[in-house]
Image (spheres, rainbow, N blue to C red):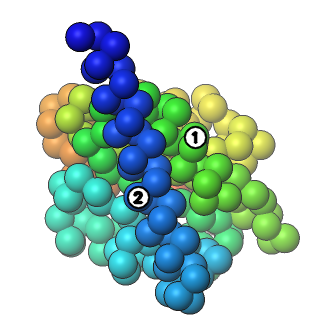
Amino acid sequence: MKATATFSRSFLHLLLLFFLGTLLNSLQTSGALSPSMKKLAGGEGWILDVARVLPNSVKEKVNSWIDSLFNETKSEFVVVTTFQNSNTSSLALDLFKEWNLGKPNRNGGGGILMLVLVNHPSVVLVALDSFIPHVSRQRVIDHVVYPHLTAKNIPRAFFLGSYEIIQVIRGKFNL
């Protein structure tokens, strides 16, 4: 039974990666996806709400913050929500690499990915330590995001976590 459960989680992990990769590749090929990742998942901006747990008003506000951040710093910040049961850290790292979020650009910007696992409350923030140090990412998770996730307030965890990460990035650029 345990081998079947492990196989199922691994299969679902690969299936989600395939789906997301295929979606982004097709958007890139059609010209709908700019290099800055602005057209993630059919126009949701910087947010891929696979779990469909975020209200439109929250997504719109956070997208506007990330748009401003990108315009000021060329830094990319992508958020993914999912019900995926596999290794959250591994999935986040795979998406981060697949989408080339770790490449600093000419203007000094970089990338960060926030993956929120909805059904087993957890969150992973992936970035290069040279862009946002692990200790800064962990502080946001421990003190801002996780308390709201465990209280089952996913929109608030997402909203406040996004705000804090944006403040960390803005601080890096003295904005």
Q: Is residue 123 left or right of residue 113?
A: left
Q: Quadrant of residue 13?
A: top left
Residue 21 left/right relative to 99 = left
Could you tell me the amino acid type at mark 2?
Answer: Phe
Residue displayed at 28% across by 20% down: 5
Locate residue 175, reporting x and y percent.
64, 65
Mark toward the start of the polypeptide (1 vs 2): 2
Residue lying farthest to the top in this orientation: 2
Answer above or below: position of 33 versus 112: below
The residue shown at (44%, 59%) is: 20
Element type at mark 2? helix
Q: Quadrant of residue 173?
A: bottom right
Q: Judge the density around disc 1: few (<14), some (14-19), many (≥20) Cα neighbours within 10 Å.
A: some
Q: Which residue is mark 2?
A: 19
Q: Secondary structure at mark 1?
A: helix
| Residue positioned 77% across, 43% down in the render | 130
Residue 147 x/y as whole percent:
27, 30
- Residue 63 in sight here: no
Q: Position of residue 37 (x, y in %)?
A: 55, 72
Tell me the quadrant of the picture where the N terminus can be found. Answer: top left
User: Tag 2: Cα neighbours inside 10 Å, few (<14), some, or many (≥20)?
Assistant: few
Taking the spot 58% from the left edge, 82% from the top edge, the residue there is 29
Q: Please, is residue 163 above or below residue 84 in the view?
A: below
Looking at the rendered structure, the kind of residue marked 1 is Leu
Task: Give the residue pinned by disc 1.
Answer: 93
